[in-house]
């Protein structure tokens, strides 16, 4: 993945976590499902080597030329 794709992916993950924390702090319990989703996707990526957001961001930003 290119550096800009990695940065965009991390920005998206941080934003989703921020939204989840805000939702939880204002009493919206369904914010925890966003956190569960992120955890699930991180484990999926770790165990299978495939992360759907990697594929999406590679399409958006293109792959590195050295890969």
Image (cartoon, helix red, strand yellow):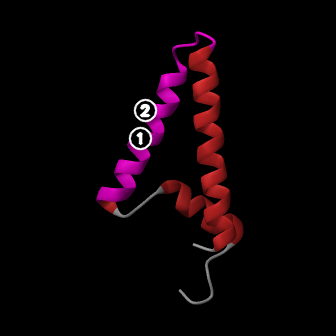
In the image as oriented, which residue stretches furthest toward the front? Answer: 25
For label 1, the residue is 39
Quarter of the figure with residue 60 = bottom right
| Quadrant (top left/top right/bottom left/bottom right) for the N terminus | bottom right
Mark 1 closeness class: few <14, some 14–19, many ≥20 residues within 10 Å: few
Q: Is 33 contained in the magenta span? A: yes
Q: Main secondary structure of the magenta part?
A: helix
For label 2, the residue is 36
- Which percent across, then down, holds residue 44? 36, 51
- Which percent across, then down, holds residue 30? 52, 18
In the image as oriented, which residue stretches furthest toward the top? Answer: 27
Q: Is residue 17 above or below residue 57?
A: above
Mark 1 in CB contact with mark 2 (< 8 angstroms): yes
* Closer to us: 36 or 55: 36
Q: Is residue 3 above or below residue 9?
A: below
- Which percent across, then down, holds residue 16? 61, 37
């Amino acid at each position: 993945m290119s550096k800009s794709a990695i940065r965009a992916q991390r920005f998206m993950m941080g934003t989703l976590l921020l939204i989840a924390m805000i939702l939880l702090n204002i009493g919206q319990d369904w914010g925890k499902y966003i956190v569960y989703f992120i955890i699930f996707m991180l484990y999926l990526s770790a165990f299978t080597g495939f992360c759907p957001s990697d594929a999406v961001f590679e399409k958006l930003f293109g792959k590195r030329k050295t890969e």
